[in-house]
């Protein structure tokens, strides 16, 4: 059985980035759970900070530069996705939304997705349920029940049930459950067979 492909999209802007740190911890926990479940997994990180200019160019011209094209292909071919954004003005960042906007409308259909976010205060955590979850539901992704929010004060928490470590473990377990029995996704899209209207009409008349 081929290895599952887990793609992590992170929209952190600073270096170092708490958003990237959260993304890495979620990826590590999910990969560990999948291997314990007997599945091999390849993890690829898509760092949007380095693609910001390419994303803007694509939105204006409609033509993705090579690096952005590879990032989009990685998301399309992923078996599962971890999406992490900082929260600005009670919603996902503009960079994160701009990347989602360049994806094909069917790219995430049926794909298991774990959503997560970072912010300066826990008051922003509702953005996961009021902004991110509706966005991925609109794109027909399968979003796992537990969304992970990390406020500044969370990074010092221990592994108790309500802590960041506990939430990471629970969300990773849910994504693992969605992926463990899943066949690996095809790495290239099969061309759809288009039947001309005249041929369809002739077939109907022949019945």
Image (cartoon, rainbow, N blue to C red):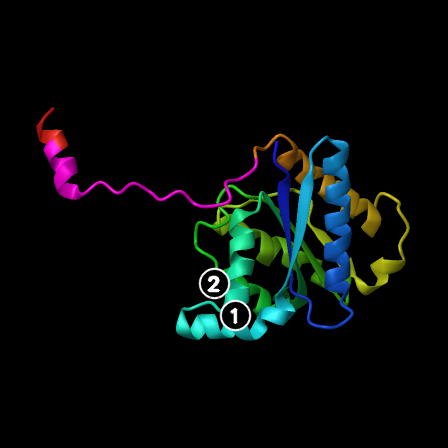
User: Which residue is farthest top?
Assistant: 207
Q: Which residue is labeled 1 in the image?
A: 55
Of pointers 1 and 2, the one earlier in the residue sequence = 1
Rendered view: 20 above or below 27: below
On screen, residue 74 versus residue 163, left or right, reads left
Provide residue 7's location: percent of width, then percent of height.
63, 51
Disc 1: CA contacts within 10 A as few (<14), some (14-19) or many (>=20): many
For the image, the number of numbered tags is 2
Look at 48% across and 75% down and name the residue there: 57
Q: Which residue is labeled 2 in the image?
A: 102
Disc 1 from disc 2: Cα separation: 7 Å
Rendered view: 142 above or below 130: above
Residue 80 found in image quarter: top right
Provide residue 184's location: percent of width, then percent of height.
57, 37
Rendered view: 13 above or below 139: below
Viewer-closest of 98 and 47 = 47
Region rendered in magenta: 184-202
User: Looking at the image, do the residues carrying marks 1 and 2 touch, with CB atoms under 8 Å apart?
Assistant: yes
């Amino acid at each position: 059985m081929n290895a599952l492909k887990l793609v992590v999209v992170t929209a952190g802007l600073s270096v170092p980035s708490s958003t990237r740190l959260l993304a890495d911890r979620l990826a590590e926990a999910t990969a560990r759970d999948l291997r314990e479940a007997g599945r091999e997994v390849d993890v690829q990180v898509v760092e949007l900070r380095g693609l910001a200019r390419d994303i803007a160019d694509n939105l204006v011209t409609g033509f993705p530069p090579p690096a952005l094209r590879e990032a989009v292909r990685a998301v399309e071919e992923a078996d599962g996705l971890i999406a992490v954004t900082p929260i600005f003005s009670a919603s996902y960042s503009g960079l994160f939304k701009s990347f989602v906007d360049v994806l094909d409308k069917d790219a995430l259909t049926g794909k298991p997705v774990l959503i997560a976010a970072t912010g300066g205060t826990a008051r922003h955590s509702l953005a996961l349920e009021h902004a991110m979850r509706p966005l991925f539901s609109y794109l027909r992704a399968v979003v796992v029940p537990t969304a992970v929010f990390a406020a500044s004060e969370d990074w010092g928490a221990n592994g108790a049930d309500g802590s960041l470590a506990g939430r990471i473990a629970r969300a990773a377990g849910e994504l693992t459950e969605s992926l463990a029995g899943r066949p690996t996704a095809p790495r290239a899209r099969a061309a759809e067979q288009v039947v001309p209207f005249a041929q369809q009409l002739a077939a109907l008349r022949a019945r």
